[in-house]
Amino acid sequence: MSFLEYAPAPESRAILSLRDQYGLFIDGEFVEGRGTPFQTISPASEERIAMIANANAADVDDAVAAARRAYDRTWSKMSGRDRGKYLFRIARLVQERARELAVAESLDNGKPIKESRDVDVPLVAAWFFYYAGWADKLDHAGLGAGPRAHGVAAQVIPWNFPLLMLSWKIAPALAAGNTVVLKPAETTSLTALIFAEILQQADLPPGVVNIITGAGDTGANLVAHDDVDKVAFTGSTAVGRAIAKQIAGTDKKATLELGGKAANIVFDDAPIDQAIEGIVNGIFFNQGHVCCAGSRLLVQENIHDEVVERLKLRLSTLRLGDPLDKNTDIGAINSREQLERIRELSDIGVAEGADRWSVPCEIPENGFWYAPTIFTNVQTSSRIAREEIFGPVLSVLTFRTPAEAIAKANNTPYGLSAGIWTDKGSRILAVADKLRAGVIWANTFNRFDPSSPFGGYKESGYGREGGRHGLAAYLTPAPVGQAAVTAGRTGAKSVSAGRAAAKPATAGRRAAKPRIETKDAAKTTRSATPAKKGAAK
Amino acid sequence: MSRLAVPKTYKLYIGGAFPRSESGRTYEVLRADGAFLANVAKASRKDARDAVVAARGAVSGWSGATSYNRGQVLYRIAELLEGRRAQFVAEIEEAEGASRAVASAQVDEAIDRWVWYAGWADKFAQVTGNANPVAGPYFNISVPEPTGVVAIIAPQDSSLVGFVSALAPALVAGNSAVIVASERYPLSAISLAEVLATSDVPGGVVNVLTGSPAEIAPWLASHSDVNALDLVGAGDLDWVSLEIDAADTLKRVLRPEGGADAAAPTLGRITAFTETKTVWHTKSLK
């Protein structure tokens, strides 16, 4: 019996009281969907968990209409203080039901319980707690006095951090005074629906948050809906691009948090024990289903062999298996489809000449699994060094000088995150300055906090989530005449009449991100290429 | 007998040099009364691409300069403009058929806007950045950084103030720019390029194209090495198609504005072409 063999220590599922089928959460009630329902399964066992309703176009209409009504009649008229109190209530309810949510998340998503219990769900509560306090302090959000909500926010989230992404979307939107229609990913609807029950317990006014389940077409219908004012999407760059095209020429604002291929740079003077842990956390956290994962390890050439050797040793101690087991380090891949993609790209890596090493571990019979894998001898042009694999696969490349590390790190169309490991503080700051990425972790990796803005450069999307910046993404400055930023002697007058009087809150100039239209005739709502897939990641 | 004037040849401004269009094309610019004023270079697709290459090459130097330095360089432009006030006033009078008072007011406003934006260079990061109180032993700070190469379609109904109002904010944070001048009133833009060439703005930071925005804009909107697209003066173009093209590489897009206050000075025009970078660092006594 090796030291890796522990007696099973599964978290009890008795804490769950799941329904056999879930409806759509619209206007404060669960209603049946009019599309064909689908089942959600545990990716670790392929067992059926529950049937999930599927929202068709009419359901999307209902959800958006409910959000609009709630915005017009209730939420936009409520004081910031009271909006904040609802968010505080939600934060507390999440804490009260934390274990239940963690178990449900691990069951439905496949992530290890120690991650859902110690990372995802605590951050969900933190996110609501943080933004709750903002609701009555919007004058300090950086947009001048009296900023306004956009109105109805359409939010489409991925399957890798189902409940956490929900909190990143809903908390700032509600704090800013928007109402919400949120669509979770097809394979991970469960915790969003439990969250809907929490909203009922919190007595949140009906329609303020609507949760509709379904696949990519549901998300595409939602994003394309004429009565949506703001789109927030986290997922693949391909879908993000389609959304950007779809909303071109409309009045919709967008926050897009898309793919990444982060460089994790390790200099030869790095604190090596911490660096090894950081590399492992960077790419094997959540089975590598992380948009900001440190999937490209850039290691200084003279320590390459040592780092790879130690990585292999460390990876050999990771336990892969039942996500609900408290000792599990590596859970299940979220879906068969994603597993196929990981396998395909991994095989391409081999075909392109890289050396593959996988942890020799037992793979459970049922479910979707992929052993932690390292590629060495990887060329910068290789697809495994360029494309987002979104799985537990690390590509190792080398560099000799800081300049080469920076050049290689930036040699990607993405720009979401990066890591730097060195004992030299001045080098950290200099390298951080040069990296074209929205989040830089120095001597750490994959840290998240509601007060810390998160989001990408380049094709990793635009807009920020978290912090004051994340709040501002759901606000527009006060109409001109109230609190305009003016310059020189002329002052800056209004250049936009804004939306029709029916939606006064969206009127006025948007100085923080001035997407300003004056050609009303040109403000036609477009329906370009519809987003074919929902949140893929 | 009056002296025979020496007219100027108006060329493009790319990478700090003044080339003609590689296409050899020019187009006529007329006075307000319809009389011939000048032949102006009609930039081609290749000129646009050359301009993007020059702009990309200038990003690291310009964005790497200190904010204080960029502020002084931008302020210096205002100084030089002030010195050539009479030239710009005369040019606007001729091109727009404006009275001296109106032309003067436009030049004054353009100069004052340079000054206003120059002053932001070492302040906008303080106003829009953040120290973030994360729940853990980490130093965490968010700062705005330049987006990179910004392509701009300048306001079309103004010689100088529209051009300056679109260009200056893009430069404040350290972006470089490829700017397509007003098709009808391009002369001030080229004269401004002469100011830039003799100021301390490094070559390639500003690249000025004259010609047809309808022809040039699609190449800039779809160019993979352009990071952001300011459509402020593109209201008469098929700007929705430009925005769709821009989505292919997820460019940041500002939409058209019109009227006398197009591109009015705001902090938002600076931050629109910035990216927020958040840096985490561990804290430890060990």
Image: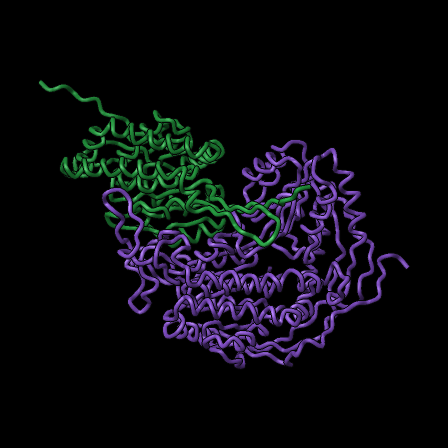
Chain colours: A purple, B green
Where is residue A536? Give x, y as percent. 59, 61
Q: Nearer the viewer, residue B114 or A341?
A: B114
Q: In which quadrant of the rendered view does residue B162 lie? A: top left
Q: Quadrant of residue B188?
A: top left
Q: Residue at x 38, y 37 (%)?
A: B44
Q: Is residue A49 left or right of residue B267?
A: right
Q: Residue drawn at (82%, 57%), measured in percent from left and top?
A: A361
Horizontal relation, residue A88 to residue A47: left or right: left
In-image side of A333 versus B242 (left or right): right
Q: Is residue A530 among what the camera can see?
A: no
Question: Image height check: is A274 above or below A175?
Answer: above
Rendered view: B191 above or below A144? above
Residue B66: image location, x then y, percent: 45, 32
Rendered location of residue A469, percent (x, y): 46, 53
Outermost right residue: A1
Q: Nearer the viewer, residue B117 or B139?
A: B139
Where residue B208 appears, as percent x and y from the top left, is: 35, 35
Residue nearer the viewer, B269 or A224: B269
Q: Which residue is at the front of the view, B174 or A525?
A: B174
